[in-house]
Image (cartoon, rainbow, N blue to C red):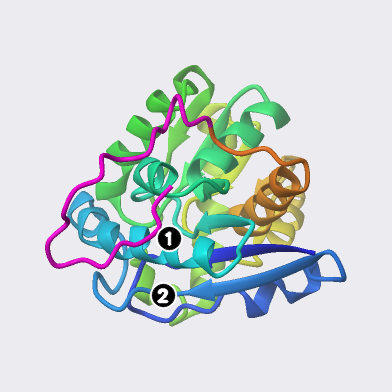
Amino acid sequence: MVTVHLIVPTTTEFEFATGLRHLEGPDLKITQSHLAHGPASVESEYDELFSGPGIIENAIRAQNDGADAIVIVCLGDPALHAAREAVTIPVLGLGETAMHYAAMLGHRFSILPTLERRKVAYESKARQYGLESKLASVRPTNIAVLDIEDDQMVTFETLVDCAAAAVSQDGADVIVLGCGCFQDMDRMMEDALKQRGFSVPVIDSTPLTVLTAAALARTRLSHSKRAYPDPPKKTMTGYHLSNRG
């Protein structure tokens, strides 16, 4: 049995584990936690910074509780490298995982995030992950995270329009949904895009990243401690970080 723990880096209790129960079985269990302190949603570097301490605390707690791998449920991958320093089990972010898969599934990919202000952040991430040449475009939907559920039909139609423009105008072969809350729309989007003459894969990053994390745990692979060494042992005033690394 492999346990993959989801860290939702917000105080809003977005529910992801329930929607992934179909992935569970005798060999996979999915657990989830949220932040006690931090942003209601992650839509800026400011939000990412304030989500960091809670992500680290939850990662350490998950490892201590017996989790075999961790997934940070945000395309911006907040505190991803810091979490890898803090624990020894695999830690994956949705953004890095989805971008690398997208690069394998086509020549170029486009990301559809929430707000316009996130465009530069995802371009920077693609560059950091060595995938800048594979990035066709970042096309924001201009739908705030906390508004995604307000009208799912409007959200869906906006995503399809952005995806069609990314394919026809930007040369994308693969579409990456740029927020974990754009969940369960991938296959419907593929059908809608086919009706417009575009046969391209659409990546819903959460289930893909969960299964990738489970595969790493099963094969006993984790991040290199040469690349992500344990942080120096020192007092961290105001935080209770035990059993790091």
* Residues drawn in magenta: 224-245
Question: Label 2 belongs to which residue?
Answer: 34
Question: Label 1 belongs to which residue?
Answer: 60
Q: Give the left or right position of residue 25, taking residue 9 as reference.
A: right
* Residue at point 69%, 27% (across, down): 104
The answer to whether residue 76 of the structure is visible from this angle is no
Q: Main secondary structure of the magenta part?
A: loop
The answer to whether residue 136 of the structure is visible from this angle is yes
In magenta stretch: residue 232: yes
* Residue at point 40%, 58% (across, down): 243
Residue 32 position within the rendered picture, expressed as x and y whole percent measured from the top left? 54, 73
Say which label, 2 or 1, has the lower sequence index. Answer: 2
In magenta stretch: residue 173: no
Q: Is residue 35 above or below residue 188?
A: below
Q: Quadrant of the N terminus?
A: bottom right
- Residue at the right extreme of this rendering: 26
Tell me the tag on residue 86.
none
Q: Residues within 10 Å of mark 1 (few under 14, many from 20)?
A: many
Q: Residues within 10 Å of mark 2 (few under 14, many from 20)?
A: some
